[in-house]
Image (cartoon, coloured by chain):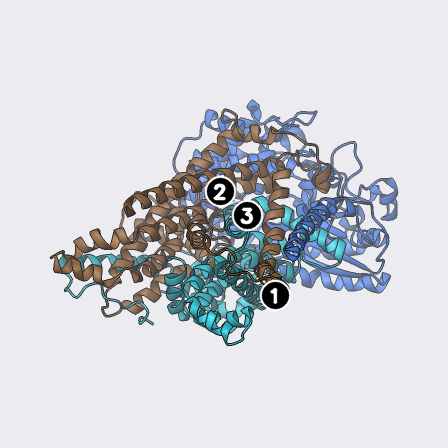
Amino acid sequence: MTADIPMTTTTATAQVDKQAAPGKSPGAARGPRRTGRIRRIALPYLLLLPALLLELLVHLVPMAIGILMSFKELTQFFIRDWTTAPWSGFDNYQLSVDFDAPVGEALLHSFLVTCGFTLLSVGLCWLLGTATAIFLQDTFRGRGLLRTLFLVPYALPVYTAVITWAFMFQHDNGLVNHVLHDQLGLTDKPSFWLIGDNSFIALLTVSVWKGWPFAFLIVMAGLQNIPRELYEAAALDGAGMWQQIRHITLPSLRPVNQVLVLVLFLWTFNDFNTPFALFGKAAPEAADLISIHIYQSSFVTWNFGTGSAMSVLLLLFLLVVTGVYLLLTSRRRKTADV
Amino acid sequence: MRSIRAAAIGAVTLSLAIAATACGGGSSTAGNGSNDSPKTLTYWASNQGASINVDKKVLQPELDKFKEQTGITVKLEVVPWSELLNRILTATTSGQGPDVLNIGNTWSASLQASGALLPWDAENFRTIGGKDRFVDSALGSTGAQGKDPAAVPLYSMAYALYYNKKIFADAGIAKPPATWDELVADAKKIKQHGAAALGAEGANLSENIHHAFVFAKQHGADFFTADGKPDFTSDGAVAAIKQYVDLMAKDKAIPPGNAEYAQNQSLSDFAKGKTAMVLWQTASATFKSLGMKDDEWGVAPAPTPSGTPGTGTSVNSMVAGINMAVFKNTDNHDGALKFVKFMTSDAEQKILNTAYGSIPPVKAAQSDPAFNTQATAVLRSTLAKSAEALPQVPQESQFETAVGTAVKELFADAAAGRAVTTESVKARLHKAQQQMPAK
Amino acid sequence: MSSATSKPRSPMAAPRSFLWARRIFLTLLTGFVLVPVYVMISSSLKPLQDVSGTFRWLPSGLTIRPYIDIWSTVPLADYFVNSAIVASAATVCSVVIAVFAAYAVSRYRFRGRRVFTVTVLSTQMLPGILFLLPLFLIYVSIGNTTGIALFGSRGGLILTYLTFSLPFSIWMLIGYFDSVPRDLDEAALVDGCGPIGALLRVVVPAATPGIVAVAVYAFMTAWGEVLFASVMTNDTTRTLAIGLQGYASQNDVYWNQIMAASLVVSVPVVAGFLLLQRYLVAGLTAGAVK
């Protein structure tokens, strides 16, 4: 479990606001009941206040400071009092996006690695989760046990899961090489999983292992909301099991998938815990995810200005992707509804 | 409506207040030291022993002694290496740190540049007994040249070649190799007898950098120019790193599996008799804790091109060690100096360095017979004759990361059977150099 | 446990191709899921030479030694207590605050409602690394100006983690509260309960699955976080996530102890999670995926 399950916003709020439009102030009484009215209007704000304050304290104000930092030359010479660090305008941004110079090139490489990794990981998680949820929809012996079992990877604290995988991925003494090389003889010599190009596969494996049960959980919940009558009607029409899955189950899951894929995307793209626990502070090039890359750019090389600028770029990218995604999917949903 | 507005104004005010205090955060604590709390000190010790608990057991009795002498209570926290630099960094940014702390001596110049550490000017040195109590080589790794040191040497260490006596005897090797050619030749013999030759930590950035530095010295190269600019791609530096990586890629002395080692697995291999040699700093205490007896291993100076360790291209170790520093904004300035004086006193130096198997950087303490055993004699003479300090430049910590990573990637190439050529080494180093902050 | 989800798709019998596909798929998947779990359990019972040599499926001998040693190699019990306090406190606070906020959004129409939900939820897009250092600076300066020690204390960590889980919790609970019929709380209001009374006596009980799901999520978030814990804790407040690294920083990597400790650390969360999974599915069904 990572710290942030990123969550989409607009789906929830869009729905809510539709209901919100009518009855803004239902039958507001005047005069003697004025204090009661004020109390009633103030109440929602009071209920929101704790959440609001915490969000300000932990998310919003720090974010603002982070953005300020991205315009400063915040190197080791100035970290003692960051406010005195000289303003550097857009220098940090220029450095980050100059893809001909090594810093920008490395960032671009890391960004592309992260995109590839995220696409594969989200795709596989979704596939496994959906397939499993569909296969476990009917009752059969051992179904409850399997479902419990499948949730274990998700319930494990992320570092314990990753440490175990790191143990299995060792070159000399690991299980993976033992099976692939010693027992099955699939490779000429033991492979390296934690360094070099294969590290991408290792990271992907761990990420999918840890992440797919979440997709499973959500899709399983989504399946509960498909009315049984749809299947019965289809069965009457003579549709077989596979056809029912294709024509009823999958289309009905679309709204769920819309949210699920976005959540998995944001979560995977920002994932720090998995690569950090697997590779430490310096990830191999092939698995240099952007979160680790930025961490290294700020904490290991002590250049918080550039690190912040990279984070801001990442944030902008995620905002744009999320916006476009929601726009596209909700439009498709609307046309599908008509 | 009024209450809503009030709530809104309240929230905005609060957030502004938070932001304002955050902005003021650094400056309120960035002032110089005081003596506001003369009875307590916070001390961050680095992890020197086999575990954090071992360190606590070694240090606590000494801290109790200090309390008896001065009445000052020292609150000890042993910080693991994986966290130490980050903790120092955050302490520097926020002013919320310990009074006294241990730092890796190679970080001295980097931390000095942040201005968070108390400079050891002549007067401060006088309070702890004078600069000339310390060995020169150790003082060479306490900060940039021409500036007051940022820290005081506490423990000194040096690299040496540790070898397994039995494997050497089985392979018919009479004496440990003194040159790299001999080492490569011996490696062939050792491998014929089924053991691996040399252990390394290919994915450990600091280990990589230490070896890279020594090899560069032996090729007459430096990673920084005299005026402190990075210069990673000189022919000497490229040849040096290639020679190190070739120990795995070409000479096959280092087994490929070591390319992913980063947690001292090479020491564990050595202790188990899987590898015949390892280049390490002050490893004797570790071997013991891994269950290897003192008479099972021997120690010799690390190889050099000429076979005789010395200065210049015959350097065979970096000056490794731990320095002790005082945070400038300590609220117990005098107590902190007293504590440093106590820890660097002859008596404490003997006790602590014996416990950790390191060499005292204090001249008077070195004469103790405890530092004249087989293990320590080699280290002591290396430190005195053929060790050189890593570059004392502000970008040292970035250099460790950049070049350390380059070597790690090269080892990964070698392990995967990919060719390691002069060009590929140069390309990696070029990239590393470009990642260094522009000065 | 299966009662909540046993809704057969169709009265029709599944064709053979489907049954075979299911059998093969589930077998492979079970293997994939189980192997690391098996490795974790078996390695934790192996003597050190088994785990530091070539991998073997079956231990050469069984020992519970690692389970004894883990407590002395690093102060695991202290870390455990820290994690338990931090995660429980963060969970309780997060749930309470989220219930209030979600109630406001679900039951009231007020200005700024949309802004609030959008803002809170979009914070989940923030890369942690962007606000790690600023947050740390804020905690320190709050400490300097008010004397409330947030940095390095459990309090600071609790505050951080509870906020991490807040957006997702609020969002889930809004969905869940929306599904609780309004007639229920209106009846309570008529009976003379205040709005808070209606929330506590009617809506909260009706939304238990959703609240449990949110609590589980909040707890897991706090139990597993690494990045912020690595900067914001010291040796008295260190949590398990960071403390476990202690086994790897020794001179020898005690894999058997690492696995034993991992298991000990995981058991409470996994057990709690699996016990509550019924609520989780029910909570997600009504809250998140509607």
Kindly identify the residue that appears in the image at 75 percent across and 43 percent down. B116
Q: Which circle, 3 or 1, is nearer the viewer?
A: 1
Task: Pick the quarter of the image with the C terminus of chain B.
Answer: top right
Q: Secondary structure at mark 2?
A: loop
Apparent colour of chain B: blue
Residue B163 location (% of width, % of height)? 54, 47
Which quadrant would residue C39 be assigned to in this image? bottom left
- Within 10 Å of disc 1 (Cα), the crowding (few <14, some 14-19, many 20+) is few
Chain with colour brown in the figure: A
In the image, is residue A98 above or below residue C37? above
- Between marks 2 and 3 in the image, the one whose residue lies nearer the viewer: 3
Q: Say if labels 3 and 1 share a chain.
A: no
Q: Residue at x 66, y 60 (%)?
A: C153
Mark 2 residue type: Ala
Q: Residue under circle 1?
A: A33
| Residue receiving disc 2 | A283
Give the class, few, some or many, for how many residues have Cα within 10 Å of label 2's Cα (few <14, many ≥20).
many
Which chain does the numbered disc 3 sit on? Answer: C
What is the C-alpha distance between the residues marked 1 and 2?
Answer: 65 Å
In the rendered structure, are the residues bearing label 1 and label 2 in contact, judged by CB atoms less than 8 Å apart? Answer: no
Q: Farthest residue to the left: give it.
A: A238
Query: What shade does chain C have?
Result: cyan
Mark 2 to mark 3 CA distance (whole Å): 18 Å
- State the image quarter where residue A195 is shown: top left
Give the labeled residue for mark 3.
Answer: C128
Q: Are marks 1 and 2 on the same chain?
A: yes
Q: Tell me which numbered mark, 1 or 2, is placed earlier along the sequence.
A: 1
Q: SS class of the residue under badge 1? A: helix
Residue A233 horizontal side relative to residue A180, left or right: left
> What is the x, y in percent for residue C117?
51, 52
Can you name the residue that lies furthest to the bottom here? C191
Identify the residue at the far front of this view: A31
